[in-house]
Image: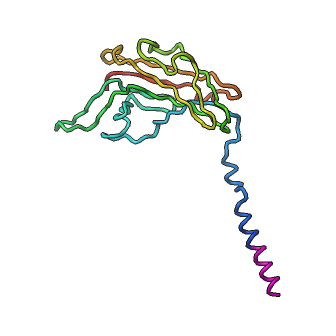
Amino acid sequence: MKISFKYILSVLVSGVMLSGCLPDPAEEALAYQGPTVVEFKNHTLGMVNNATFGLDYRGILSSSGSTQTDSSRVISLAGYSVTNSEGRVTRVISPRTVDTIFVQLVGPQRSAETVVNFEVKTTSTAVEGTDYTLEPADTRTVTIPANSSQGRILIRPNAASFTGTERKRLDLRLVGAENATPNPNYDTFYVTMTRTF
């Protein structure tokens, strides 16, 4: 009798423990089930701004008229210190010498790199080679490495080509990749460049 009780108890305990290893249906329901797409990602959206290490310190303007969205941001090409009426520095705005735009893969990661094509839209007011350069410079592609979900486009603004309060905008649009179409909600990204706060 003792042996059968221990046997029954061990079977019950093992069953409970093993059932904890089964996938949770609620978690499976949260997993992305749609088609594989590529999209722009504004990695600075939602960052807290403060006078020392916030968005302004990184050269991303967050004052009125310069609000970020999930598909745009305004960057400063000149450094400033903003003071209050008592002469105390209230904000530090650093020049943004390189801006990074993330392109992300939404769907399963791939064992090989994903090459995503993009274009500079004709609506851009910034001129490539004069107001900025792109990296990679030789192609209109961004590479998402194997077993990863994001790649990067680097923008190097040329602050010397901007005068006064002038603002110029770079408009990028994703064209797509092999077996990954652009997400129509996040296929365009706008970077506005200025020297003034």
Q: Which residues are magenta?
A: 1-12
- Quadrant occupied by the C terminus: top left
The dominant secondary structure in magenta is helix
Q: Pick the residue in front: 145 or 197.
A: 145
Which residue is located at x 56 percent, y 17 percent? 139
Question: Residue 182: x percent and y percent?
Answer: 64, 27
Q: How is the image coloured?
A: rainbow
Q: Residue furthest left?
A: 86
Residue 45 is a magenta residue:
no
Which residue is located at x 35 percent, y 15 percent? 162
Q: Image quadrant of residue 187?
A: top right
Q: Is residue 3 left or right of residue 83?
A: right
Count of picture labels: 0
Q: Image quadrant of residue 196?
A: top left
Question: Residue 131: x percent and y percent?
Answer: 41, 15
Q: Is residue 89 left or right of residue 170?
A: left
Which residue is located at x 70 percent, y 56 percent? 24
Q: Is residue 93 left or right of residue 36?
A: left
Question: Residue 85: x percent and y percent?
Answer: 18, 36
Which residue is located at x 81 percent, y 84 percent? 3
Q: Pick the residue in front: 123 or 150.
A: 150
- Quadrant occupied by the N terminus: bottom right
The image shows residue 21, relative to residue 145, as above or below, that is below
